Amino acid sequence: MSPEPASRLPAGHSAAPEARRVLKVCGATTPDDIATLDAAGADCVGLWHGVPGGHAELPERLLTVLAGAALATGRLQPVLVTFLSDPEALTGLARRTGLRWLQLHAYQPPAVVRAVRAALPDAVLVKVLHLRGGRCLERPLIGAYERAGTDLFLLDTTTEDGRVGSTGHPLAEDDVLALLPRLSRPFLLAGGLSPHNRPDFDTVARHPGFRGIDVDTAARDGHGRFSAPAVTALARAWRTATSPEESP
């Protein structure tokens, strides 16, 4: 079963993605990528647009094609992954492409979330929180992000030189656990995750707010292509903590 489509979520900032643990794979660039991820058991596919210099940056035309291909599977939810911070640009892009899940992956302020929420009341808004050296850079703004309309947080690392997104740098479970009391929205985990380090996050994976993981490199083979066995291994490893029937 795929993640709950945004059109079936409650409107407004009280919307909450379903509790099922999901696997989001970032960086699709071709229809073949979409087919591989769908067949291998991914739930969400991250499509990059407005990520300057990003290895999976898509022009709007191809973004629209891939979003449509994902929706046509009937189970794979396309997610816009973007550094864009202009609410009008974000709103227009979402309406033109049909994307309903928007992941704000840079340092967009709460005001951007608020404006996008007002314009797109049925969207699912994912705000990334960046941890560097164990410290969440947006920690003072978490409450403001929630009040502005964030549905789901994504916890990820940033490097010491400031790089964000698909860095492969792992989070430490203790750092995640220290941040969780500040969150009243569910969250996804990112940052160097693999089937092998799943046991390192046992406590986080049992947290009632945990909704799954977001990966890029771990879903690929040695040539950088998406690998069905790799995606399936991730899905199996990270869905063992809580079954859908046990989810809150």
Image (tube, rainbow, N blue to C red):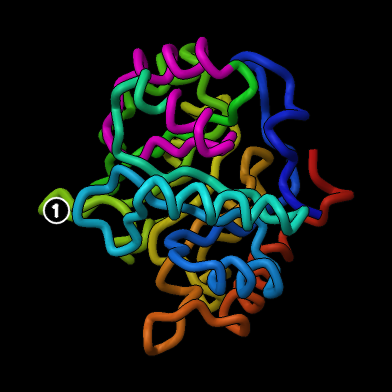
Q: Is residue 183 left or right of residue 243?
A: left
Residue placed most toward the observer, 105 or 245: 105
Q: Residue 38, position in %: x, y?
A: 68, 67
Q: Residue 157, position in %: x, y?
A: 31, 52
Residue placed most toward the observer, 105 or 204: 105
Which residue lies most toward the left here?
161
Q: Is residue 175 left or right of residue 186?
A: left
Q: Residue 196, position in %: x, y?
A: 52, 78
Residue located 29% across and 27% down the image = 85
* Residue at numbered disc 1: 160
Residue located 45% across and 50% down the image = 63
Image position of 115 with respect to 128: above or below: above
Q: Residue 248, position in %: x, y?
A: 79, 38
For the residue labelled by badge 1, is the local secondary structure a helix, a strand or a loop?
Answer: loop
Q: Is residue 141 left or right of residue 4?
A: left
Residue located 30% across and 33% down the image = 84
Image position of 150 with respect to 39: above or below: above
* Magenta stretch encompasses residue 110: yes
Per the rendered image, the range of residues in magenta is 91-120
Residue located 60% across and 16% down the image = 121
